[in-house]
Amino acid sequence: MLAKRVIACLDCDIARGEARVVKGVQFKKLSFAGKPWELAERYYEQNIDEICFLDISASLEKRQTMADVLRRTSKRVFVPLTVGGGIKSREDARGLFRAGADKVAVNTAALERPELVGEIAGMFGTQAVVVAIDAKKQSKEKWGCFAYGGRKATGIDAIEWAKKVEKLGAGEILLTSMDRDGTKQGFDIELTRRVSEGVNIPIIASGGAGDLQSIADVLILGKADAVLAASIFHYKKFTVKQVKEFLEKKGVEVRI
């Protein structure tokens, strides 16, 4: 069995050419959390497994700023780096890989043009492609995919979309529950389990990390392969070491 991964998420908002890490609740009410490369270095020193940068205000100009963030981070942090936001082509992905990214995450562009997943996977390998799914509950057993940072409903079923992107060449899925994002009330276990059981690629659970038990629950009950958290790390509620030690006590294999 592969060790479960603990991933730090850095939501980056870019204003006046400078990136800053922010955190919100259900994709709203953003507050400042720090500079991306400084937070990344803190988590690296705490033995984080991976770091994910998500540009929440992506555009062509801002993507250059994210490339600079990656270059600055990769000089001091030596764990896999994923970056997402505004990636619409293989050329966009290539620029970020050259800047230091190990993986790229696509969401809106893939929903609008699914073949993008295969194009990036064909050039850089499936291991380099993460499809991000922002899912919101629509009924008892249905979750819909949202695009443009959670602002636009697509009418696409999240579970069926996960199955499709696996066939298209995605190497893993970053699954965010919009209902739980930033609430610290625990992950959407049912959503995570349903997607995990529907595909054969790793699932990163996101949205709702609040206490240590909630993290263990989504890895054990939700069958996630990795957990992504932001607030609990940014505001120093828990360290990466505390999370991993708790998981180990619960019988979850992690890299200590």
Image (cartoon, grey):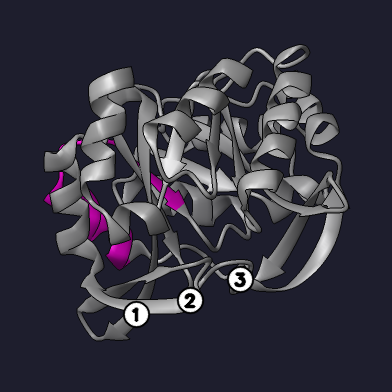
Question: Circles 2 and 3: CB distance less than 8 Å?
Answer: no
Could you say where residue 160 lies in the image, as x and y percent from the top left? 14, 62
In the rendered structure, does residue 194 fall within the stretch colored magenta?
Answer: yes
Label 1 sits on residue = 137
Disc 1 residue crowd, few under 14, some 14–19, many 20+, Cα 10 Å? some
Amino acid at dot 2 = Asp
Label 3 sits on residue = 27
Amino acid at dot 3 = Phe
The residue lying toward the viewer, choosing from 88 and 13, is 88
Question: Circles 1 and 2: CB distance less than 8 Å?
Answer: yes
Which residue appears at 65% of the width and 12% of the height? 78
Disc 2 residue crowd, few under 14, some 14–19, many 20+, Cα 10 Å? some
Q: CA distance from mark 1 to mark 2?
A: 7 Å
Could you say where residue 22 lies in the image, as x and y percent from the top left? 77, 57
Q: Secondary structure at mark 2?
A: loop
Q: Which residues are magenta?
A: 190-205
Label 2 sits on residue = 179
In the rendered structure, does residue 163 fall within the stretch colored magenta?
Answer: no
Q: Is residue 153 visible?
A: yes
Whichever of labels 1 and 3 marks the residue nearer the N terminus, that label is 3
